[in-house]
Amino acid sequence: MIISGTQASPQAPAKLSSPLPQTAADPATSQVEDSAKVTISSKALQKASDAEGKTDELASPYRLTGPATLVSSLNPVVYQMPEALIKEMEVRGKEEAARNQISSQYARDHQYQTVGQVLVNGKLFAEVNDAGGYASVKNSIPGLSDATLNPQERLEEIAQALKGQGKVEIRYANFEPGLGGSGGPGAPESMLPSFTARNIHDIFAEAIEAAGRLRSASLPTSESKAS
């Protein structure tokens, strides 16, 4: 497995004229942000320069402000992940797959059962299972609590939320054909094999730290620069 990064030249990266949407940081890469720089192709830079003099046209999507860093001015740096960490990742993957298989089988063997339904004007609107979970003909029911409720409490809450929409009825027997997708609980932790390998985040953190040390060691010192 290869960890790759870039060693930037002294030039500052380009500043875009409009902000980009923020995205969640990847834990496997956020620790090497300092070695990454925005790169702009020479073609995009040329189009941006051409657009600067055309004030009578629409704003160019390639418009830039400030200095830009060319791809050709970057020196790629590649680090090999230690073999021990690669093997640990393989072990973790196998352990997670085994646990997922056991948990899935447990859910199939212990499917939730419908214990009540809420009807509006004689038509099924929602149903509640023996774990207090519910399904409805709509994506959401306004006014429901996020708290964990037992099945009877959830049925009563749904019925209360549907007041004013017609004749509301709670049934505990003689159910209408259900909505399907009852699912089931995951296996308890006591039934699952224990992990022997660390999680992927911790493994990558160690790999990135090691790559950072190698990168620092490979950079020229101030004394060698002066000479």
Image (cartoon, helix red, strand yellow):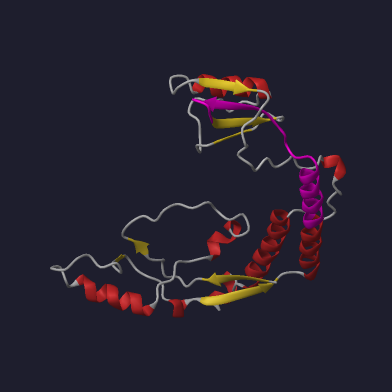
Q: In the rendered view, would you say 147 is above or below 85? A: above
Residue at 34% x, 68% y: name it: 67
Residue 79, x across and y down, in percent: 66, 73
Pinpoint residue 29: horizontal percent, then vertical percent.
59, 60
Question: Please, which residue is most extreme toward the left here?
Answer: 56
Which residue is pictured at 35% across the width and 79% down the height?
43
Asked whether, in this view, residue 208 is left or right of residue 32, the answer is right
Where is 89 relative to 49, above or below? above
Res. 13 image quadrant = bottom left
Give the quarter of the figure containing the N terminus.
bottom right
The C terminus sits in image quarter:
bottom right
Which image quarter: residue 206?
Answer: bottom right
- Labels in figure, total: 0
Q: Nearer the viewer, residue 91 or 218?
A: 91
In which quadrant of the rendered view does residue 164 lie? top left
Residue 104 included in the magenta stretch of the image = yes
Residues rendered magenta in the picture: 96-123
Q: Nearer the viewer, residue 20 or 95?
A: 95
Height in image: 200 above or below 122? below
Q: Which residue appears at 26% of the width and 75% of the height? A: 49
Question: Residue 135, percent across and down?
Answer: 59, 35
Residue 171: horizontal and vertical position, in percent? 63, 23
Of the pair 135 and 49, the residue shown nearer to us = 135
